[in-house]
Image (tube, rainbow, N blue to C red):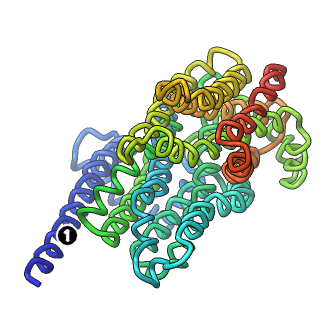
Amino acid sequence: MTRTKTSSRRRRNGFAQSCAVMLCIISCWAAPQCCYSLQLSHPLTSNNDWAISAKREVSSKSSNDSSSLLTTIRGGGSKSSIPQTRRRSLVVLLVATALFNDMLQLTMLLPIIHTLVSSPPPLGVTNNKEVALGLFFASKDICQMMSAPFAGVLCSKFSPHVALISSILGLGVATFVFAEAKTFWQLLLARGAQGAASAAVLCGGLSLIAETHPQNVRGKAMGYAQSGLAAGMLMGPLIGGLLFERMGRKNTFRFAAGMVLANAIAMIMLMGVAPPESSRDKENDNINKKVETDLSLAKSSKQLLRNFDILAVTASTFAIHAVVGVIKPLSQVVLDKEFGVTMVKRSFIISIATLAFFIAAPIAGILSDRMQRSHLVALSLVLMSCSSAFFALRHLGLWAFYVSVALLGVAMGVQKSSSQSLLADLVDKHELGEYSMVYALSDVADSLGLIIGPLVGLALSQMYGPSVGVLSIGIPCLLLTPVMLRIA
């Protein structure tokens, strides 16, 4: 009894210390930013002059504070004195942090969920645990796929800023539900809510980068943003396992929810300090006015679905993620049964793909600003085909499996950085209106690939073996390569 009380006290103290550290980090970040904002707004020489000026302005501006804050969050408002290049860097940091938090929350569950499902009811299940696990992981992709079009409409009707901040708040609430869940169905509901929020994070974040960055620097920005996603994917299982072991389920997800909500607060503050400025308004002002007046949301969405280049890039996204979806579960089975690899070593081998993704994404983003982005997408399709081929050649040794996993990560990094930039270029080229709907379409293809790939690949693997299952899913990547090379 004494040990139980001591351990619970330690957990509470650890949680309190973690919250205190998080609040200190937020305050340390916020204080200089607010001071810098005040210096920009009032470049006066003395503190007395500043105080007198502030008193005069309080009475005239107090009635407009709430409306100006709302305008700032929506992406409008007065222009900041911060240079545009600095504001673009802050936008990339904002989006990369949002993607990091999104993927961190999604992957923190990987080492934990088996323990939760194996718990006594009502939190866990007693029968068909494998089915429950499959349903739990599939719920995220299904909800993300179904929510992506609504996220695109949200970005179009309001702004990417509103969608991004709303999705981060929703992600924080969903993560908090994990802490307080008492039944398996509540866990399932929270996982589905995470998928829906993830769709809005992707649509809002990528649309914000596409809006604020011109074509010649867009690829680099997308690459750095995708690095945040890869970092969250890499660190999520490690952080989730460590926190769960030390703090327990409730405190772990309360802490994670606090991180997400702190990110949302930082976003709102950043919008006030340096509101992003659309590069599209300056470069294509006349074109955009015509698009806004002539194209409705429904009409522009129909044009997206009829555009061959857009559909080709979307098909490449589907094919890439279908291979990822089938290799991910089969790799665990193959490493266990064919090579006898322990669970810890299996986790290390799989993390090679995430590390390769983290390294390849910014490099591919920089390259996409200096060469044709469609060629980089074609390269990613070739790399993914080679990954499936090396998976089939694993009988040559474990080194072939290492190569397969590394190529998979590189292909993901190259494809995500270059294809997201290419989609924005095609929207500008064909005057298709808002960026958000094309990213919603890409998100649907992403989720659909992760759903259909395992269904078809695993079915073929049961009938003909894992090699046939992976190769059959990898062949469409090779077939799509010449199609991508034709896109100018």
Classify 436 as above or below 127: above
Provide the residue designation for mark 1.
11
Whole-percent x, y for residue 163 in the image = 61, 57
- Judge from the rendering whether residue 352 lies leftward or rightward of residue 454; answer left or right: left
Asked if residue 23 shows in the view, the reply is: yes
The quarter in which the N terminus is drawn is bottom left
Residue at disc 1, secondary structure: helix
Rendering quarter of residue 470: top right
Asked if residue 391 lies left or right of residue 187, the reply is right
State the image quarter where residue 231 is shown. top left
Above or below: residue 271 compared with residue 171? above
Residue closest to the far top? 370
Residue appearing at x 13%, y 80% in the figure: 5
Q: How many marks?
A: 1
Which residue corresponds to the image point at 74% horizontal and 57% vertical from the top-left? 149
Seen at 59% across and 32% down, the residue is 391
Mark 1 is surrounded, within 10 Å at the Cα level, by few (under 14), some (14 to 19) or many (20 or more) other residues, namely: some
Q: Vertical placement of 41 versus 125: above or below?
A: above
Task: State the image coordinates of residue 366 (x, y, percent, origin top left).
Answer: 55, 21
Residue 457: x and y in percent read 70, 46
Residues 97 and 459: in front is 459
Q: Residue furthest left?
A: 2
Assign the C terminus to one quadrant of the image. top right
In which quarter of the view is residue 116 placed?
Answer: bottom left
